[in-house]
Amino acid sequence: MKTNENTVSIFALGGINEIGKNMYVVEYGEDLIVIDCGGKFPDESLLGIDLIIPDVTYLEDNKEKIRALIVTHGHEDHIGGIPYLLRKINVPIYATHFTLGLIELKLEEHRLSRDTKLIAIDSDSKLELGELNVSFFQVSHSIPDCLGIVFHTPAGNIVHTGDFKFDLTPTNEQYSDIHKMAAIGQQGVLCLISESTNAERSGLSPSERMVGSHMNEAFMKADGKIFVSTFASNVNRVQQVVEACMKTNRKLALLGRSMVNVVSVAIERGYLIVPEGMLIEANEVDQLAPEKVAILCTGSQGEPMAALARLASGNYRDISVYPGDTVILAASPIPGNEKDVSRIIDNLFQLGANVTYGSGSTTGMHVSGHGYQEDLKLMLTLMKPTYFIPVHGEFRMLHHHRLLAESVGVEPGNTFIIKNGDVVDIENSIARQTRRIPSGDTYVDGMGVGDVGEIVLRDRKQLSEDGMLVIVLTLSKTERRIIQGPDTITRGFVYVKDSEDLLREINRLVKKTVNDLQAENIRQWNVVKQNIKKSVGQYLFTRTKRRPMILPIIIEI
Amino acid sequence: MKTNENTVSIFALGGINEIGKNMYVVEYGEDLIVIDCGGKFPDESLLGIDLIIPDVTYLEDNKEKIRALIVTHGHEDHIGGIPYLLRKINVPIYATHFTLGLIELKLEEHRLSRDTKLIAIDSDSKLELGELNVSFFQVSHSIPDCLGIVFHTPAGNIVHTGDFKFDLTPTNEQYSDIHKMAAIGQQGVLCLISESTNAERSGLSPSERMVGSHMNEAFMKADGKIFVSTFASNVNRVQQVVEACMKTNRKLALLGRSMVNVVSVAIERGYLIVPEGMLIEANEVDQLAPEKVAILCTGSQGEPMAALARLASGNYRDISVYPGDTVILAASPIPGNEKDVSRIIDNLFQLGANVTYGSGSTTGMHVSGHGYQEDLKLMLTLMKPTYFIPVHGEFRMLHHHRLLAESVGVEPGNTFIIKNGDVVDIENSIARQTRRIPSGDTYVDGMGVGDVGEIVLRDRKQLSEDGMLVIVLTLSKTERRIIQGPDTITRGFVYVKDSEDLLREINRLVKKTVNDLQAENIRQWNVVKQNIKKSVGQYLFTRTKRRPMILPIIIEI
């Protein structure tokens, strides 16, 4: 479709029907602005895949229109794809001071040369990007310096909330700028794009301040060392741990690469205040009395290589968990991580620690950074949008978010539940979703980006379940008789020593197959290989109920 | 250790530090009784494994002492290992009428000939098994006909609770026989073996009756078809669905093999009462008005091949979910299943259904069959044991159960938190844990039982993450020069067409490796293969950050 001059187009390249790889686009005439560029961690069905990023074919095809990548905040699901995007397209990046700090860390890790323009903005910035004017408003979330975005287009205002909650008692100045939001709503919002993570949860999200008071209590009570595990990027929570240390006169050690990195960015940039001399090195922990030290560590999601898992299994150099120590998991397990987290808790109890764990709402040691139903309704009420696009969520969350929108007055029919790649075109104030642009998942595996696709994954799945057999056979070129082999090599199938008669039968079957074809004068390699696969495969399935991959290799001499 | 005449020994072959494969043993003199024989579903790290069962080496070595397998109830984690045990040891099985029905189903599935003695008991039965007298008491749980067991040994009484909760308002006569339990406690209990599943949950477990009233409400409100997904074995809940159908004049269809099988066992044996004419076939559903029909189906844990998943993805023959239909998930997702369940809920919402889901406690559509902390304390209080062994749980659950026991008067030091294989010997009323017997996991993969071990699993893991390369090379026997190849075949690594220069470099490296060794006059195949693996492996890791399995195959002609 050719869009006319007065059309503003909105779509997602990631973030819909998933939690992760957020990437949204607002396009008007010859100008295109990208919002966020996130990564997503694969589930276990994507064997060997390290990261999923959005397919950016559309952006590559429309390079010349891209005016900016605006990043709402520094979480992985909003910045994790940036290094991969920059390898394809050089685009100026606009983000707040703290978010830029995290993006710079990421670019250093990827050894990306610094020819990308990184432009610091704050919630008072006003940008002119082509024909689009852009302004911002501050929102509360579980990381500092988060933005909502207003696109002032000739067709009307488009608002993207970023990730948000309303925290009326935040632990720093990162409040939700309700007055500004009210003014934006008052000006008129053509379309609101709002996050949906907690659209299933009723009520108003609790304040981060609640965690502080529970943290203080726990620190007061504890006799031994205290370990606190949380997300490194939750600087407000880290600040509250620092304050609990001050109150109880404890030194603080940081464990885990991301904890050390993010905390230094936060200190350097003024988002975290740590008293002089409070921070100690890991190897100094044992030199202090246990009641004089606390440890902040990564691994609250049960990541097997992170600090907490290694502490729990007694594999951390310098530091051990002793009976009577306290361990606080200041995070709720993300769905899919429960088992790994439970295993760590079990190990910590076995070491004799007192462990505080469970969903944050029961322990008081975690609150979500995403608004609940009442937060979402408040945002909708403030913005009074004509059209509404719920984003950042799985389908059921988007569905519930639509119901919330209707409950506060968004017209039925004016909510668009889209898929990644669906384009909402708003033309002369009428919104329609009729066209799609290319979208999808790009898999990162090691250094490879996009080189692992369905066939490779299907092979990995078969290999992972039943292993493989390589059958090597040397045939004489002239007579086509077997002059060596068959030799069978298995991996991931069964122990060879347990299965000698199985291998004997395979050899017999292979010989028979080759000889039978020989008798019929069939000599095409493909046919010979197919027949070997078939006869051996059937035999193995009947005998073992397994379907290993069978690779016949025929050498002609 | 040689145990003396007055020693009773207690141990687990499964069920400790895990949820699943329950198997406990009480041994006295020349008599050994096995309690339960469960299976456990593997987590995703055990690639290709179908089921885990207990290692029963100890039982095989002590075959002549085994007097009975007593099965407390019919859940998979208590009966799933029986067919595998029976292939090794023929042992008479004692269980209640309903439990035996499920065991018989299982033996038929495995086509096990019926030379096993199956002996029906009830909570009033008294058995003399060698020198051991055994009696029973009735407990409430989420399946009918559950038993607790009392072993009357000359050394004292040993009580095993089975799985239980105290449901004071059960939906049938499957009440907890508190009077009998009190009497047992009054006689004196030397050692209590009690389940720990919900030892982390405070309060008293809610009654199954609560589900019934919520089910009735939901049935009253619904206009379209109603789908209810729950565990087939939860016959009390099935009965409540039947009653909601009666109240709202709906017919009932059963979907899913286990639903059909278990419901017929329950009806045949008198545990479920379904009015004449209520049950209809799946293909009759569409002939009735939607408000006249309900469907009970399997798949509440998100199992991808079960009825609910197929309904949600529109792949169920005969029956579709239409907008306005109601779907009730009358089960909480077991940890690890959350993602699969969520995917189904998303699909159902996309079909336009009203879906009731979430943890049972919030929807009122599920209650746990396992007692909470107050239930566990009530059992401990009734039994007043001298010694206590918490079982059926992961470590943190056993740990909390110990704290509960101490809170109601079990002496500190008298609780034994054991591992599978640890033996508690009680000799002259003094309990000690000093010895172990063999124990472990036996993996079932297809028809193979125990033929897949660490090496096979390690290979599967490597294959699953990075795939493999087979490098085939033909050398001349006399001169040792390359006469054919190298040819490289990859599976699960990268697309070959995307990686031609990679393959070229591999060929070059292989040739160089062979020629270098040739120049040094090194001819051992092993060395040649090792060197090829090393040089190609290093190259691939540097280039791709992947470590595929490399299989060099050398043919000498």
Image: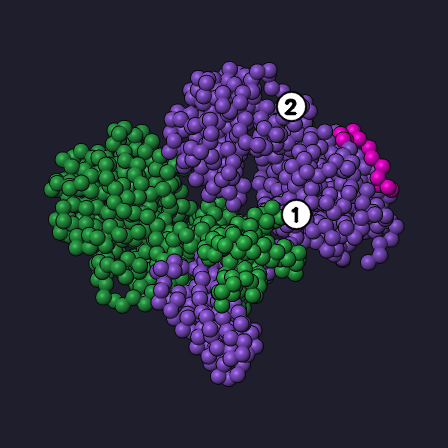
Chain colours: A purple, B green
Question: How many numbered callouts?
Answer: 2
Q: Residue furthest bottom?
A: A520
Badges 1 and 2, same chain: yes
Quadrant of the image containing the N terminus of chain A: bottom right
Q: Is label 1 in a helix, a strand or a loop?
A: strand
**What residue is pinned by disc 1?**
A53
Pinpoint residue B122: horizontal percent, then vertical percent.
23, 54
x and y, in percent, of residue A30 in the image: 86, 48
What amino acid type is highlighted by mark number 2? Answer: Ile
Say which of A226 and A16 sits in front.
A226
- Cβ–Cβ under 8 Å for marks 1 and 2: no
**In this figure, which residue is indicated by the disc labeled 2?**
A267
- How many residues crowd mark 2 within 10 Å: few (<14), some (14–19), many (20+)? few
Find the magenta span and give its range.
A120-132
Residue at (32%, 38%) from the top-left corner? B376
Does residue A497 appear to the left or right of A79 in the view shown?
Answer: left
The subunit carrying tag 1 is: A
Query: Do we see residue B434 in this rendering?
Result: yes
Mark 1 or mark 2: name the one nearer the start of the chain.
1
Residue at the spot x=38%, y=71% of the render? A505
Q: Is residue A388 above or below residue A550?
A: above
Nearest to the observer: residue B97 or residue A277: A277
Nearest the viewer among A147 and A272 is: A272
